[in-house]
Image: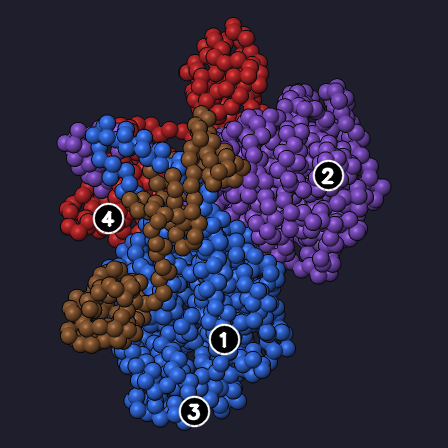
Chain colours: A blue, B purple, C red, D brown
Amino acid sequence: MIEKILIANRGEIAIRVIKTCQALGIKSVAVYSDEDVNSKHVKMATEAYHIGSAPPAQSYLNMEKIVETAVSSGADAIHPGYGFLSENADFADLCEKKNLNFIGPSGKSMRLCGDKMECKAAMIKAKVPTVPGSPGIVEEVEKALDIAHNIGYPVLLKSVFGGGGRGIRLVHNEQELRQAFELASGESKAAFGKSALFVEKFLPKIRHIEFQLARDKHGNAVHIFERECSIQRRHQKLIEMSPSPVVDQKIRDEIGALAVNAAIAVDYLNAGTAEFLRLDDGTFYFIEINARLQVEHPVTELVSGLDLVKLQIDIANGKEIPFKQKDLKVNGCSIECRINAEDTFLDFAPSTGKIWDTNIPSGPGVRVDTYLYPGCTVSPYYDSLMGKLITWGQNFEEARQRMSLALSDFYIEGVETAIPLYKTILNSKEFITGDLSTDFLDRFKILDRLQNDLKDEALQKSEAGLAATLIHSEFLKNKIKTRKEHGIRWKTQVDRH
Amino acid sequence: MIEKILIANRGEIAIRVIKTCQALGIKSVAVYSDEDVNSKHVKMATEAYHIGSAPPAQSYLNMEKIVETAVSSGADAIHPGYGFLSENADFADLCEKKNLNFIGPSGKSMRLCGDKMECKAAMIKAKVPTVPGSPGIVEEVEKALDIAHNIGYPVLLKSVFGGGGRGIRLVHNEQELRQAFELASGESKAAFGKSALFVEKFLPKIRHIEFQLARDKHGNAVHIFERECSIQRRHQKLIEMSPSPVVDQKIRDEIGALAVNAAIAVDYLNAGTAEFLRLDDGTFYFIEINARLQVEHPVTELVSGLDLVKLQIDIANGKEIPFKQKDLKVNGCSIECRINAEDTFLDFAPSTGKIWDTNIPSGPGVRVDTYLYPGCTVSPYYDSLMGKLITWGQNFEEARQRMSLALSDFYIEGVETAIPLYKTILNSKEFITGDLSTDFLDRFKILDRLQNDLKDEALQKSEAGLAATLIHSEFLKNKIKTRKEHGIRWKTQVDRH
Amino acid sequence: MKFKLENTNENLDGEIVKAAGNNEFVLKIKGKERDLKVITMTHDKVEFMLDSAYHITKYLENSTNKITLVIDGVKLTFNKRPEMDNIVYKNSGADSASDSQAHLKSQIPGRVVSVNVETGANVKKGDVVCVLESMKMQISIKSHKDGVVKSIKMKPGASVAKNDVLVEIE
Amino acid sequence: MKFKLENTNENLDGEIVKAAGNNEFVLKIKGKERDLKVITMTHDKVEFMLDSAYHITKYLENSTNKITLVIDGVKLTFNKRPEMDNIVYKNSGADSASDSQAHLKSQIPGRVVSVNVETGANVKKGDVVCVLESMKMQISIKSHKDGVVKSIKMKPGASVAKNDVLVEIE
């Protein structure tokens, strides 16, 4: 039985895993880079060890150092979180070799999931429908151009190591494909040390719908409903929810069964996710298995009542999944908004720095998974996800109202976020009626609406803002006077904190 | 339809009601006394009005002023919260007279519930079993002594205006009854302007189990399961949970039906609670109806998925309850700990003052309803409830683990609380096995165990505390030196904030 | 430095062995060497790693006799003079004073509802001396000893703060 | 005082009519009298009731030209010189500079992955000038105008801060 878990990650997911460890009385071991000395996961763990400098390759991607730390600290298991080493089959193998219980699938199964081409072949064999596209990995740009020419533009250029939408690029013609190929190849090399790209038919106005999976060592396999993740930017998810507005119990049973078959086809173990695209005509295509806990797992937790990290630990301990498919019922509705440090008006470019102040929302049906606290720092070395705001309601409308309210309560000073964008989306009639697709932002010109909403909001508050400024100016004048009389420079008064 | 609600209350319950108003897009009007200028409910409401000085009689109990404020602010409804005017039938009548929708039962029904003697008569007629005791109100101490003599000591002396355990006194003999009668009479006069006491047989080792009720204007009535509220001090609830460890579905159906009959017997409208005592042999006795939202309503919200304030507003709007009894299923388990400003080791005496710092716990399955923020003040003028920590889990054990963890995360600097006591209770084998009763604290000498737990906890942290102190002393020495050199007095450094 | 941990029999001693630079120190606590790395330090707060565990400490009081701090949410009081007696746990609604003291102090803030004794009266330990009201509750304050009421320091309607003297009994 | 609300055409003017004592004031805003009561005020924060509604304001910037504040979670910028132009919304991964400016500045912090132009080269608006990496993403920085590269202010591997000049194009 697992008694001490090293969490090979940082940020909100490390904290998420620690919380379950604490509740279960399992000791937790955090690891941290130079950049993360002050991070919350370090403060919350039972023990914490420094593993290297800021760049991921020298810390959170350093398998040997992490495994060594696990062994020397007496941990008997490793939770990889998401990102970093979570889908690295070599890491899973290394853990096994060192007698560390890797909380996830076997290296072999992970390799199969990660090799999108082999995975596709396994799915076709298991009669799980897949997206039309390139038959294998494309190593040279010329080969990619050939394939694209055959299946017809536009096409998607994807990285085998992608995951979570990272490294997916839409290209409309030869020139764009050349440019994208070079960039994607470079990114992949920087992050994973190698590049492996492939080409797929671009499908317009699609929904991204995925199924949460769990499978134990005794061969029991279940799906834990779907998540609708169609609100995206640059092919990365922004808003997720469960259930999907276009999945009823019949579809859930049907596609859920496909998802379970997909898990069996790759001998998947532990919690994972089968991702599908859904066309407007209701066709579902399997795209990939994410061989790890997802960023958006909380929406599934809130509608199922399950603690998925606990479930992962139970499965890793060799226990049977403690419920059957028929025991699971969707309870209410849950929505998640990813709180990224990004500037919406700069094409979601990163925004980093010190968080001078923050207010984390709370209340009935509100959950926030975050590493933020006043005074913490958002580092340019790691990804932009600072936290996740998740709400639950008896139905979609209640979850939506609570989200809208919680977004207004969420204050982060120091970096830009998409919180105002989310308010515009949440209050749009298209979101309310469930008219979702991965091109939602473009299709409904949401950024234009956002500008109008921001203008309206500013106008609504302008008189109160002016009133505050009148009074405050008086105060400052008197302060400056007082300060000058005491011979202390005014500047000290406006220094932050 | 209700568009603007005045909340005739303060503290966490005012905030709780405002949260639902915000989610539903209903405007909220706060009222506040001199003492509450800086209170959170004032800051959160759409509008806020000053209604008088600190003593409740001059503000939160001033019916005319509150109704006048409601009318002049354009509110169309009043939510009374709990305590203060919430069970004052005259107030309900006054609201009706002024065309304000009182969110609660009618004055007539409230009067019947409030008059414990008439209520008892109505219950006997409706075949709802009640506790053996005095036939009516006892106005003079000599009369009380007679009755006690007849039914035999020990007896409970109760106030008709009590509610929430307030004004209940256990007396073992004539002398105690005389003293208690005088005190109870005084308290009741101070709080409600009049006194009305009665005597009831004291039942040893009982559980306090209550049923949440709702009844609409169309005659639909349901119960929303039970709450086990047996962990008490001085007859006031400390910890509540739903479901109760001794209530299975059969008992829930049976006693729930009695609770619904009780509501019908007094023509009860809106959300309310039927309180029962349960003897060790499984007998349930009805004791009273609380004609308002309870402090402990969140545990019912977490296991039913309902927003009870929303349900109250719907019923006040004349809507039908949007579900039937058979649609309701207990989902998981929820526990609440009341966070009172009280000193456990001073017999739970009040502890008031400024809250220098606070950390509010959060995380999966954790909810906190509170008015606390760093810098706020806990006033001696109002009751000691600063907030409520509520957890949910798939089962009792998960809810308990999450509570235990959240209690450790809850930090309040400035007043004493029972948080350490709750940790001792939550981790006791008697609580874990569900061996509960209203004399739980005495029966298991919990305060002695608490002293041991505190000692153990202190010993565990003592070496780290010493390490901190060694380093900090060095720091202070250097600081004082530096400060002296700059001619600024050391004292400014240790001033708080 | 030597301390006694209040409410326990624990005596502790420790010293800084060396400052290793980069905010790192070697300490000796109860005879054992420990590594400490300071993360942040202010006049009333220390965040640090001791060996591999994070701790946060806040100082509430630092007087000549004792230091009160909260570490990881746990309140500790170190007596600086280990030879001093422990302070006993408070255990009643009244005073923690011993029989030998004349002053009966209030341990709660509140308003005086009634004064139940007169100057010169005889009282027994446990007799109700006065009734205070706080947070909607009435609380009887009982005499901490047998004796004669020497003086009464409050009157009905007055507010009393924590530690105010209510009566003197000799 | 007169202000223009940035990104809108809203001109605002207001004054303090009188201090009514007890932290209460009468203001005139856009010609209408309003009651204001200050709850707390510090060098960068004001909490107040305006008529009957609570507001909290935090000042992020107070320069000679403009005031940026957050009120009830909403960020406002008041231009102190209403005759000045609005600042246009940022709208690309590159600079908000207009054609007339030579400097192409970085609007993000990051590490330079590659420099795609040479000094003296002709570039067209939209051509990729360099690639930055930040938060695991590679971002192409495009020229904001047609012109000739006059100087290059960074090199591969270097870190750039927000608002650092990347190249000059004339």
- Work out which residue is located at the far top of the displayed protein and give it: C120
Relative image position of residue B454 (x, y in whole percent): 42, 40
Instruction: State whether residue C71 appears in this view.
Output: yes
| Tag 1: amino acid | His
What label sits on residue B99 in the rendered view?
2
Identify the subunit bearing mark 3.
Answer: A
Report helix, strand or loop for mark 2. loop
Residue B141 versus residue B331: which sits nearer the camera? B331
At a point 50% along the width and 14% down the height, the residue shown is: C154
Residue B272 versus residue B285: which sits nearer the camera? B272
Distance between the Cα atoms at labels 2 and 3?
Answer: 70 Å
Distance between the Cα atoms at labels 3 and 1?
Answer: 22 Å
Name the residue tied to disc 1: A208
| Tag 2: amino acid | Asn
Q: Nearer the viewer, mark 4 or mark 3?
A: 3
| Tag 4: amino acid | Val
| Tag 3: amino acid | Ile
Is label 2 on the same chain as label 1?
no
Name the residue tied to disc 3: A151
Identify the subunit bearing mark 1.
Answer: A
